[in-house]
Amino acid sequence: MKIIMPVLAIMICACQKPAPTSAPAPNREAVDLSPAAQKNASVEIVLAKIVSIEQTIEAPGKLAWNDDKTVSIGAIATGKVVHVYARVGDLVKPGQLLARMHTHDVHDTKAALRSAKAERERAESALEQMKRNEERMRRLLDLKSISLSQLEQATIERKTAESAVRKAHADEDKEVQHLTETLEIAADVDEGPDHSHKHNEDEELVPIKASAAGTVVDRKISPGAVVNLGDETFTITDSNSLWCIANFPESALRDLRVGLTVEVEVRAYPDRKFSARIARLGDTLDPATRTLMIRADIASQGVLKPEMLAAIRLRLPSTSVLALPEAAVQNIEGKQAVFVETAPGKFAPRNVEARIQNGQAVILSGLKEGERVAASGSYFLKSQLLREAGL
């Protein structure tokens, strides 16, 4: 029995097979390429270097009429539109007749003017009578036929009559001013004793005139329309001057100021760049988008129109940065990375922080000047890395 046990142990050991050796784990730290593979994959090596680039900040925006050069013509009375002479697109001059309207305000003002004129004439007549009475009292006082208090009373009455005359003149002037300056209706109409007169019907129609030179861009009235005091009738603007309204990110606030020139591009003319000058900065940020609205003056140049969508770029002074071609930066598992050549044909991924600008990747961190990095062909390296890692 003592001899059998060692033999059995030897037999059991002989029957057991040796454990297979594990295959080497895939290399997740680098990609190795032979010179031929590197050539077939068109992998190009570039040096990370310091370059001087022009920084730009871009914001979306749109074009609009320049409110500083846009006027709204309001109705100066309530009434009915009789004639309309101007159309949208017409060029007008200051004071040009745009329309005429009928309003009872004209007849009411003329009636008030007649009453004021009659009151003024009555007050002037009463004043003349008070002056004569005062003079008579003065003569009687010289003859010692009356007392001094009687003369003083006559003087008070004369002064009261003078005040009434001044008030009557002011009331008449007020009605004349409203008729001639506000309603722009002639006040020197010849009238008979019954206030009847012959006149051209248009003489009593209130004119609607342009208050500034420009282009009629909106007309809200037509013949027969009823308008109320203050209603908008026409909108006139300088069509050569527009506003470019844009919303810049909060991070750009330190670079924005009134007077800066910005570059504007619109979809209708992608090959043209238009220049605008910042005229106003918003007072507060939009709480939802964290952006600041700016308004920039821009000339239409005969091609730009309101409501066009635009891209607005603020160009900042050039600065020195570490840069690579944009193609060098890949996204690996949600992070920006580049492939650094650590040895001939060996490329190791490295996480970086980069900002893409004007076709270049501005490296903010993770790379040093002079390091060799794969530019074109880096996507192939990314694919190879993920394949070897089994991802």
Image (tube, rainbow, N blue to C red):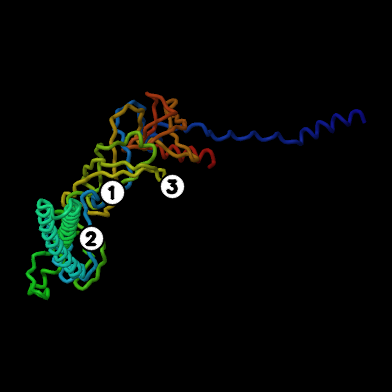
| Residue 323 picture quarter | top left
Residue 194 location (% of width, % of height):
11, 76
Q: Amino acid at mark 1?
A: Ala
Count of marks, rendered view = 3
Please give the residue where the numbered disc 3 appears in the rendered image.
288
Residue 307 location (% of width, % of height):
27, 54
Residue 150 location (% of width, % of height):
18, 54
Mark 1 lies on a secondary structure that is: strand
Q: Amino acid at mark 2?
A: Gly
How many angstroms separate mark 2 from mark 1 (CA)?
Answer: 32 Å
How many angstroms separate mark 2 from mark 3 (CA)?
Answer: 36 Å
Answer few, some or many: residues within 10 Å of disc 2's Cα (few below 14, many 20 plus, some between 14 and 19).
some
Mark 3 lies on a secondary structure that is: loop
Q: Amino acid at mark 3?
A: Ala
Please give the residue where the numbered disc 1 appears in the rendered image.
310
Q: Tell me the quarter of the image containing the N terminus.
A: top right
| Residue 183 picture quarter | bottom left
Q: Is residue 381 left or right of residue 104?
A: right
Relative to 336, say whether 298 is above or below.
below
Mark 2 lies on a secondary structure that is: strand
Say which label, 1 or 3, has the lower sequence index: 3
* Extreme-right residue of the structure: 1
How many angstroms separate mark 1 from mark 3 (CA)?
Answer: 21 Å
Say which label, 2 or 3, has the lower sequence index: 2
Relative to 334, say whether 196 is above or below.
below
